[in-house]
Image (spheres, grey):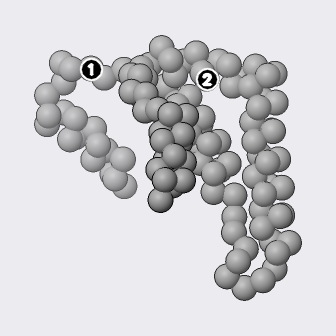
Amino acid sequence: MIRKLKLMWLFAKMTSWNPIPEWDQEDAMILKSFMNTMTGRKLTFKLQNQIISANERAAAKATPFESGWACGYRGLLAQFEYLSVVPPNVDTTENESDQADSILEQYNP
């Protein structure tokens, strides 16, 4: 029992919660420009290769219900891609009916 409490105390000491900083349009533009550099492309290729190798390792087990897939690496790459999307500028002068009309325009034949 004391061993478990000691392990829990050591784990709590090593991990800490940090508040998530606000991510704005400027951050997205900086990340997008970084991802378009050679280093950013290398990072993307490295993550994609990690996804492929993790999938290969999971498929190599080839036992039913024990093989997995590269969920963590895919999630990390998707997070980078999501954070690098620059949101469009929102014009607050439009009223709601104009916004609804603009949304419905995509469905016009």
Q: Which residue is mark 1?
A: 91
Residue 25 in the figure: left or right of residue 54: left
Residue at left offset 61%, top offset 23%: 32
Q: Residue furthest bottom?
A: 64
Name which quarter of the figure residue 60 lies in: bottom right
Near mark 2 (Cα within 10 A), the count class, few <14, some 14-19 or many ≥20, is some
Residue at left offset 54%, top offset 48%: 7
Near mark 1 (Cα within 10 A), the count class, few <14, some 14-19 or many ≥20, is few
Q: Earlier in the sequence, mark 1 or mark 2?
A: 2
Q: Position of residue 98 (x, y in %)?
A: 18, 33
Q: Which residue is mark 2?
A: 32
Quadrant location of the C terminus? bottom left
Amino acid type at circle 1 is Asp
Residue 46 can be seen in this image: yes
- Closest to the observer, 15 or 71: 15
Residue 108 in the figure: left or right of residue 74: left
Residue at left offset 68%, top offset 48%: 73
